[in-house]
């Protein structure tokens, strides 16, 4: 296997979600390579913009969608800026998929708490799609989503579908509302006041900025959810995605190959993790 | 493993033959420092006499012949609005002569990272497989502590290893290639006297070590002393220059960079050696740094070296050559830092 080889993809669609984030639909050009590509919820790809750089981006689509993949990308620096300037038809590369996944099979028959902060809803969409594709496998499913301000909410057009069609309860909160905002304001942990959970039979997935993990997981720990039932997706600087460059190391663990998905118990025992 | 004995003059003939046929790298005296101490470097040689096989230690290990400071991983060629990726491996069969035991062991550790696992590096493998490695024992410097880490003897990772037994070398042959090459020169099976000399030499070298660093229980100690003030004490001195990592035979942290050529017709994707001591090593988009303080970075380098690395969490990646200690302008060396940590926990 040529470990440095990228799959060439075409951008087949771009949707502006907010002034900062765009959703890209990427399709692997070569049909044979496209057939080979599959991933599990929670994994990421390295997106290559030749000449500019390569960045790790979580897969944000359904693992069942073999035609194209969705990536939600925030304008954050050199490479992501270039991506935002790309046009439909532009060609970028991907390597991967890399990393560990959320153990969706292990969660079958349980209640799920899917918790995201800010851009964290992007990686969370893969498990959400998984759940909607296998809805009868899971019991009560809640999505708890918080952002700083209302305009930062991502994928607002899908909430209705998740609630009505897929019977997932969606709760949102912002730190600071505006004149149009009628919903909750405060920290994301406040959303726990609006739900009842059965801690022993609940699994949780948490995606968001590093500060969020501590608060949210601590809160769930107090509610009695076992630490090995909570899964977090860690973010680190990444250059290779293959456990070689050490940029993503946490203690003696590589986020790119041993993660990004870790259960909270392991993370608690990792030096430097959160 | 097969053992043979070769006279030094016959060895000279053997190596001269290799030099004639292959690109050959060996230890060369290149300069002297302010105190008049010799400075040695591994460089390409064209004759046996250019080498100084009695060299004490080369400031840089042979790491960079396997992990060049900068190397092309792939190239993108542009046409109209499209591009093609090209991956090429350039391999020259070559010979490296006179490599010390700890440096060979360092390579064996790098093998675990770059040749094993799910994503072996074809670039590294090509270089490793196409290099004929001749090792050679030496008298340790006062500050070498490879014996403390059990890295003063080699078991694998080389083709041929020479132990000095006076007028001859006691050869350890570790590859069929080496065995075949040796057919062209005169060697003999070791006799009783050769065996005795060999064992004497090994004992003598063992006794010559002056520096001992107690490493038992070090992995656990790294965890226990994670919050220790010792990190701050040494971290505050650190200049974040990365010299320690550049000279270390096992430091392999790197970055991946992409550069467009001036004619805008192609770009190169390159692996560039880097160091975890450098400020932005763990910085992510938006400016958040996972290791903002000097002590965090210094600690991390020690943690990676002694707590365990890659797949084998129990193996220490340091081989005890103390190049980092000698190179550090701030006077930081592993012996002092580890001793401080021990004092801290044993008080
Ligand atoms: C597992 C994982 C999943 C991610 N998923 C998403 C996602 O779905 N959507 C999204 O918008 N962003 C995601 N990110 C963050 C995204 O990778 C960074 O925003 C992006 O790398 C910034 O690159 P840049 O070249 O634009 O910025 P620059 O600051 O110019 O970055 C230069 C280099 O630094 C590295 N780098 C910088 N910031 C980060 C970072 N935060 N994480 C990792 N490497 C970094 C990159 O390798 C890049 O080559 C994810 C990060 C990780 C680790
Ligand atoms: S002593 Fe220093 S330079 Fe030598 S292997 Fe250990 S860390 Fe690297
Ligand atoms: S060589 Fe010394 S000063 Fe430079 S980064 Fe290493 S420990 Fe710090
Ligand atoms: S990204 Fe290189 S080791 Fe993880």
Image (cartoon, coloured by chain):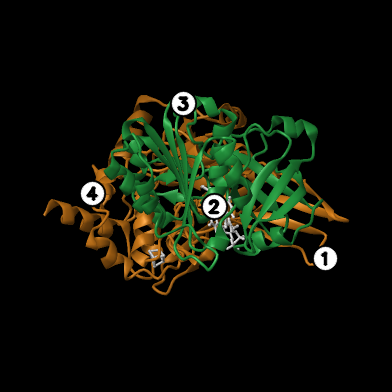
Chain colours: A green, B orange
Mark before the other along the chain sequence, 1 or 4: 4
Marks 1, 4 in one chain: yes
Residue linked to disc 1: B263
Q: Is residue B320 visible?
A: no
Question: How far is disc 1 from disc 4 in space, using C-alphas?
Answer: 55 Å
Image position of B133 with respect to A49: above or below: above
- Mark number displayed over residue A18: none
Q: Residue at x 46, y 26 (%)?
A: A108
Task: Tell me whether circle 3 and circle 2 mark residues in contact (CB < 8 Å).
Answer: no
Q: Chain of mark 3?
A: A
Q: Secondary structure at mark 1?
A: loop
Q: Residues within 10 Å of mark 4 (few under 14, many from 20)?
A: few
Image side of residue A239 versus residue A51, left or right: left
Mark 4 against mark 3, which lies toward the viewer?
A: 3
Image position of A98 with respect to B48: above or below: above
Quarter of the rendering occupied by the C terminus of chain B? bottom left
Residue A9: give x, y in percent of width and height.
75, 44
Task: Tell me whether circle 1 and circle 4 mark residues in contact (CB < 8 Å).
Answer: no
Residue B11: give x, y in percent of width and height.
53, 40
Marks 2, 1 in one chain: no
Task: Tell me whether circle 4 and circle 3 mark residues in contact (CB < 8 Å).
Answer: no
Residue linked to disc 3: A108
Residue linked to disc 4: B224
Residue linked to disc 2: A238
Q: Residues within 10 Å of mark 3 (few under 14, many from 20)?
A: some
Mark 3 against mark 1, which lies toward the viewer?
A: 3
Ligand 4 within 8 angstroms of badge 2 C-beta: yes
């Amino acid at each position: 296997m040529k470990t440095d080889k990228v799959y060439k993809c075409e951008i087949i669609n771009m949707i502006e979600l907010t002034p900062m984030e765009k959703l890209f639909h990427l399709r692997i050009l070569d049909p044979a390579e496209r057939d080979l590509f599959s991933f599990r919820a929670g994994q990421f790809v390295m997106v290559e913009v030749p000449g500019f750089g390569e960045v790790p981006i979580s897969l944000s689509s359904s693992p069942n969608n073999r035609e194209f993949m969705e990536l939600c990308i925030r304008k954050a620096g050199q490479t992501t800026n270039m991506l935002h300037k790309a046009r439909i038809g532009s060609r970028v590369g991907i390597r991967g998929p890399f990393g560990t996944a959320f153990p969706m099979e292990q969660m079958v028959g349980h209640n799920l708490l899917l918790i995201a902060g800010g851009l964290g809803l992007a990686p969370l969409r893969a498990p959400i799609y998984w759940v909607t594709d296998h809805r009868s496998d899971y019991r009560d499913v809640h999505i708890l989503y918080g952002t700083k301000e209302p305009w930062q909410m991502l994928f607002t057009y899908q909430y209705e579908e998740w609630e009505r069609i897929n019977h997932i309860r969606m709760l949102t909160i912002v730190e600071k509302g505006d004149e149009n905002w009628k919903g909750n304001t405060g920290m994301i942990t406040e959303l726990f006041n609006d739900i009842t959970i059965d801690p022993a039979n609940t699994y949780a997935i948490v995606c968001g900025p590093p500060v969020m993990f501590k608060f949210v997981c601590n809160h769930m720990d107090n509610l009695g959810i076992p630490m090995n039932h909570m899964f977090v997706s860690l973010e680190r600087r990444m250059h290779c995605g293959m456990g070689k460059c050490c940029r993503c190391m946490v203690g003696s663990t590589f986020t790119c190959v041993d993660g990004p998905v870790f259960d909270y118990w392991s993370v608690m025992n990792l030096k430097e993790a959160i | 493993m097969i053992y043979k004995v070769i006279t030094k003059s016959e060895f000279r003939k053997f190596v001269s033959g290799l030099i004639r046929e292959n690109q050959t790298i060996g230890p060369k005296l290149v300069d002297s420092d302010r105190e008049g101490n010799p400075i040695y470097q591994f460089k390409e040689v064209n004759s046996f006499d250019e080498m100084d096989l009695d060299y004490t230690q080369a400031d840089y290990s042979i790491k960079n012949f396997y992990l060049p400071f900068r190397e092309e991983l792939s190239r993108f060629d542009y046409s109209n609005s499209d591009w093609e990726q090209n991956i090429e491996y350039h391999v020259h069969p070559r010979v490296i002569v006179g490599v010390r035991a700890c440096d060979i062991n360092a390579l064996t550790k790098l093998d675990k990272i770059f040749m094993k696992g799910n994503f072996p590096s074809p670039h590294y493998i090509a270089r490793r497989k196409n290099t004929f490695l001749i090792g050679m024992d030496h008298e340790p410097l006062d500050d070498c502590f490879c014996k403390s880490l059990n890295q003063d003897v080699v078991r694998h990772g080389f083709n041929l290893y020479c132990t000095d037994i006076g007028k001859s070398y006691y050869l350890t042959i570790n590859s069929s290639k080496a065995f075949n090459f040796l057919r062209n020169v005169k060697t003999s099976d070791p006799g009783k006297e050769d065996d005795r000399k060999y064992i004497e030499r090994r004992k003598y070298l063992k006794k010559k070590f002056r520096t001992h660093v107690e490493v038992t229980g070090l992995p656990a100690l790294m965890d226990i002393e994670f919050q220790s003030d010792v990190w701050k004490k040494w971290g505050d001195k650190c200049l974040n220059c990365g010299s320690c990592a550049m000279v270390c035979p096992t430091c392999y942290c790197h970055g991946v960079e992409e550069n467009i050529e001036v004619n805008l017709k192609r770009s190169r994707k390159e692996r560039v050696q880097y160091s975890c001591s450098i400020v932005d090593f763990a910085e992510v988009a938006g400016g958040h740094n996972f290791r903002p303080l000097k002590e965090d970075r210094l600690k991390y380098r020690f943690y990676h070296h002694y707590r365990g690395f890659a797949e084998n969490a129990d193996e220490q990646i340091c081989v005890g050559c103390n190049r980092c200690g000698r190179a550090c302008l701030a006077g930081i060396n592993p012996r002092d830092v580890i001793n401080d940590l021990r004092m801290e926990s044993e008080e």
